[in-house]
Amino acid sequence: MGARLRGFFGRDARPSARLLALATLAGATVAAGQAPWDLWFVALPALGLLTALVAAERRAARRVWLAWAGGAGYGAAALFWIVEPFLIEIGRHGWMAPFALFLMAAGMGAFWALAGGIAGLGRTDATRALGFAAGLAASDLLRGYVFTGFPWALLGHIWIGTPVMQAAAWVGPVGLTALTALSAALPVLGRSLWRRAALAALSALMLGAFWVAGTARLATPEALREPAIRVRLVQPDADQRLKWRGDMWQVFLDRLLIASAEPPEKPLDLIVWPETAVPFLLERSGAFLSGELAVAAQGVPVATGIQRAEGTRYFNSLAVIDPRGAVAATYDKWHLVPFGEYVPMAEIAARFGLAAFAAQEGYGYTAGPGARVLDLGPAGKVLPLICYEAVFPQDLNAAPERADWVLQITNDGWFGRIAGPYQHLAQARLRAVEQGLPVLRAANTGVTAVIDAKGRILRSLPLGAQGWFDADVPPALPPTFYARTGDLPATIAALAAILALALARRRQSH
């Protein structure tokens, strides 16, 4: 075993510094396809270059190193915003920021290294390229589940905002990744220049077919929702650095109250405030809810983010407040952010003073019991999501019944103002397409938006703006194929592709 490890990590087993740098640069360039840049036409050839580098390498260790370098470059460029939460209290947490970025990039590299290992099932450049494509799809699938999952910046996300995104209604996000990886790999399969050109044309035709099909789906009209559901979304723009300050929390709360009190042009069915909008625990908010909030809402129910406690346990929650100021329903976030909202082995971590910095009480939040659909009467049946939960397509599929629409409350102030909030918004758009359900999101600092069941943003408030607007909830579509099957077809397809490569290699070796 020691000899094998020396062979894998030894100097001769690593590619040249020039090749590693090229692979890292190619991976970082693939990240240009992610929001807010959305340069899929740059990302795709960059992924093709990385695929060619991996496929051309005959030594297994070097191939894995190249794939790791590409993934690390991609992770660093796509997820650089991960340092932002550590800069909110820079004196306390700032020292962790570079380590967080390094670990995130290295972790992404590890998943792509797995794809590099799967590429080794092929015995030729062409089959190694196909193996790498299958491995990238498999690694994106795994990344959505292992260690509680982190399916952020999947390769397939480069199609969000284009007609190709509509394919997610059938194949989901991992299917989009498979399409992306295969499109990048096809030109690598040719041995001569003209064959590569022909395969590149085939790749373009394949993507063009998805583009045309998506355009046709977007052009299909939807029936109007009857009766209409009218919702007010409020964005207070509470800077995270100031949100909990003793001289500022009342300012932000007043913004919410004033916006809620504005007279509507049409009767409202619901007013929505973002995640942790109320700065008190639910158990200590009775006078505020039945007083200031009820007066401002003028007989309209309010769904607000709020923290609540049960003994020594604390929850990141959504509470629905009825016109009298009483709590009509609650939902507790159940897919928590590791280290952000809870600390694994919290009792041991507490001895060292480590706490989840998003929680205002205790050492972190307790996870709720699971997905839930709230029946809000005139406002319909609502599937609530709190912030990070919108990243997980499987969390929406876990709902006990089909909702009329999805409500996401979030505090994207943790994610900075460059890329993180836009990537979060993009994923909410993809969830809408996957489920065939409209998504309404109220964000503390933005982007607050109404998204229809095909992922189009109908109305929004920009990042860093204070304001509100009223909008009708768009109509839902019939349950999509992905909503009925989830990631099972993609899992079967990825395993089948990897098995086919393994069997082909075995036949060739005999």
Image (tube, helix red, strand yellow):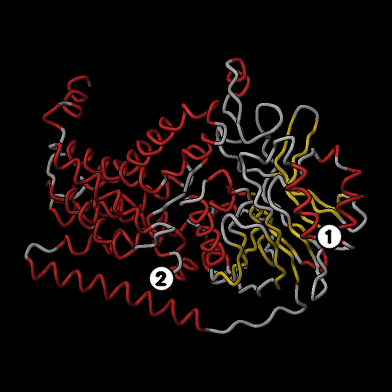
- Regarding mark 1 in the picture, which secondary structure is present there? loop
From the viewer's perspective, is residue 274 above or below residue 87?
below
| Kind of residue at badge 1 | Pro
Q: Residue 301 carries which label?
A: 1
Residue 210 sits above or below residue 362 on the image: below
At x 76%, y 27%, the residue is 312
Q: Viewer-proximal residue, 481 or 363?
A: 363
Residue 126 in the image, given as x and y percentages of width and height: 16, 57
Q: Residue at x 67, y 65 (%)?
A: 405
* C-alpha separation, residue under disc 1 versus residue under disc 2: 38 Å
Name the foreground residue: 199 vs 443. 443
Q: Percent x, y for residue 97? A: 45, 32
Give the residue pinned by disc 2. Answer: 164
Left or right of 421, for residue 155: left
Indicate the secondary structure of the residue bearing disc 2: helix
Q: Are marks 1 and 2 in contact (CB under 8 Å)?
A: no
Residue 14, by quadrant, is top left
**Lateral position of residue 81 relative to residue 392, left or right:** left
Q: Nearer the viewer, residue 96 or 194?
A: 96
Quarter of the rendering occupied by the N terminus? top left
Mark 1 or 2: in front is 1
Where is residue 149 shown, x and y percent of the image? 49, 43
* Numbered mark located on residue 147 in the image: none
